[in-house]
Image (cartoon, helix red, strand yellow):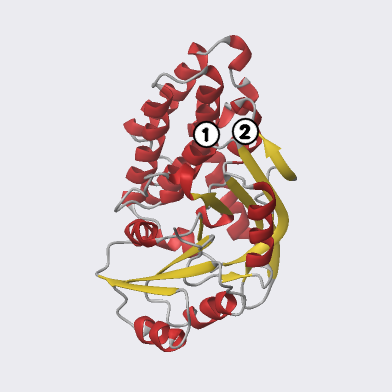
């Protein structure tokens, strides 16, 4: 039986400028109970060589070199090799806080939670900004799924913002070949969780590149968000309780905002696709079909019901901002 408590999976693709900083932040605190699984996902720059040189003589390190299959496939490759009782994820251009492993290990040994939440900090060359991902404080025992509402309302599913017990992952993998894979992974593990522990400290650093999201948006992103929304709906259509249905519906409402954002950038602010219209109607109809006490209030559904008007308002804000600059 493995003595490894924590497996940290690091997928890497063409991150030669950042991978040393990333791995240094991990290696400086790596202990005998933790392992690192580095997945080089077919990098075409010097990422592979840098990884291999940094890992010489180090213990509890596994390196996987594979052809490029994308972030989901790289994470899945790490999951298959992971021996730890708990699984953490770190992207190859991000960093760990020096106290990450100590804080996470303490939470594991004291509380044995299904999920550990951590806060994060977003950094650039010029600045650092803390942002909160934790929805609780300390230990939270989930007696009723409706107690997960703060998580689903927040709808921030960054996979690297949690550490997961391997027993609740239990053959759950990322959707191969799709972006926004966190949306299709993290919420379903929360639905299985009985004990959540929140460490209200920014223990992971997320490297933010200004405008990187809008510059990289493609039509396939629209299709991947539709896929994620349909997955929420399909899960809710299974034999699950009203509490689980309303949690998933909240995520659909919040994720619909992503869909609008992507559609605005790909298709323009004034072009409404039939698929967007169908999804909006699905959300509204599914809300109406719930028992009244579980229904989402209309004030929180405005951006779904009036999504065309919302897109027009977004266009106006964009033009106003450009004019002021």
Q: Position of residue 95 (x, y in %)?
A: 57, 71
Q: Position of residue 108 (x, y in %)?
A: 63, 53
Mark nearer the N terminus (1 vs 2): 2
Q: Residue at x 33, y 32 (%)?
A: 275
Report if the CB atoms under discs 1 and 2 are less than 8 Å apart: yes
Q: Quadrant of residue 120?
A: bottom right
- Answer few, some or many: residues within 10 Å of disc 2's Cα (few below 14, many 20 plus, some between 14 and 19): many
Against 314, residue 143 (above or below) is above
Q: Report the number of discs.
A: 2
Q: Nearer the viewer, residue 204 or 103?
A: 103
- Residue that mark 2 sits on: 148
Q: Nearer the viewer, residue 278 or 1?
A: 1
Q: Residue at x 36, y 87 (%)?
A: 49
Q: For the residue labelled by badge 1, is the local secondary structure a helix, a strand or a loop? A: loop
Q: Residue at x 41, y 18 (%)?
A: 239
- Answer few, some or many: residues within 10 Å of disc 1's Cα (few below 14, many 20 plus, some between 14 and 19): some
Residue 37 horizontal side relative to residue 86, left or right:
left
Q: Nearer the viewer, residue 69 or 196?
A: 196
Against 39, residue 256 (above or below) is above
Residue 4 horizontal side relative to residue 175, left or right:
right
Can I make out residue 257 in this image?
A: no
Q: For the residue labelled by badge 2, is the local secondary structure a helix, a strand or a loop? A: helix
Q: Which mark is residue 158?
A: none
Q: How far apart are labels 1 and 2 at the CA level?
A: 8 Å
Q: Position of residue 136 (x, y in %)?
A: 71, 42
- Residue that mark 1 sits on: 191
Can I make out residue 239 in this image?
A: yes
Q: Position of residue 70 (x, y in %)?
A: 32, 61
């Amino acid at each position: 039986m493995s003595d490894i408590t924590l497996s940290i999976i690091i997928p890497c693709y063409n991150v030669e400028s950042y991978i040393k900083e990333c791995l240094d932040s991990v290696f400086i605190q790596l202990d005998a109970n933790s392992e690192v699984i580095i997945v080089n996902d077919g990098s075409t720059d010097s990422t592979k060589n840098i990884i291999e040189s940094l890992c010489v003589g180090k213990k509890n390190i596994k390196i996987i070199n594979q052809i490029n299959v994308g972030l989901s496939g790289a994470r899945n490759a790490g999951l298959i090799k992971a021996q730890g009782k708990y699984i953490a994820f770190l992207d190859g251009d991000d960093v760990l806080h020096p106290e990450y492993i100590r804080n996470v290990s303490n939470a594991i040994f004291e509380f044995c939670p299904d999920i550990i939440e951590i806060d994060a900090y977003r950094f650039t060359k010029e600045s650092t900004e803390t942002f909160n991902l934790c929805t609780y404080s300390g230990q939270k025992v989930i007696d009723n799924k409706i107690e997960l509402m703060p998580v689903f309302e927040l709808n921030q599913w960054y996979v690297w913002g949690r550490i997961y017990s391997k027993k609740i992952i239990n053959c759950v993998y990322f959707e191969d070949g799709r972006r926004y894979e966190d949306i299709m992974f993290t919420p379903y593990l929360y639905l299985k969780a009985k004990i959540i522990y929140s460490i209200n400290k920014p223990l992971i650093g997320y490297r933010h590149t200004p405008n990187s999201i809008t510059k990289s948006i493609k039509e396939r992103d629209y299709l991947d968000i539709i896929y994620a929304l349909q997955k929420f709906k399909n899960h809710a259509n299974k034999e699950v309780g009203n509490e689980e249905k309303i949690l998933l519906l909240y995520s659909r409402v919040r994720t619909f905002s992503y869909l609008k954002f992507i559609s605005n950038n790909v298709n323009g602010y004034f072009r409404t696709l039939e698929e967007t219209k169908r999804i909006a109607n699905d959300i509204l109809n599914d809300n109406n079909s719930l028992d009244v006490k579980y229904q989402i209030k209309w004030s929180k559904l405005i951006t779904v019901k009036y999504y065309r008007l919302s897109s027009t308002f977004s266009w106006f804000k964009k033009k106003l901002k450009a004019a002021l600059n």
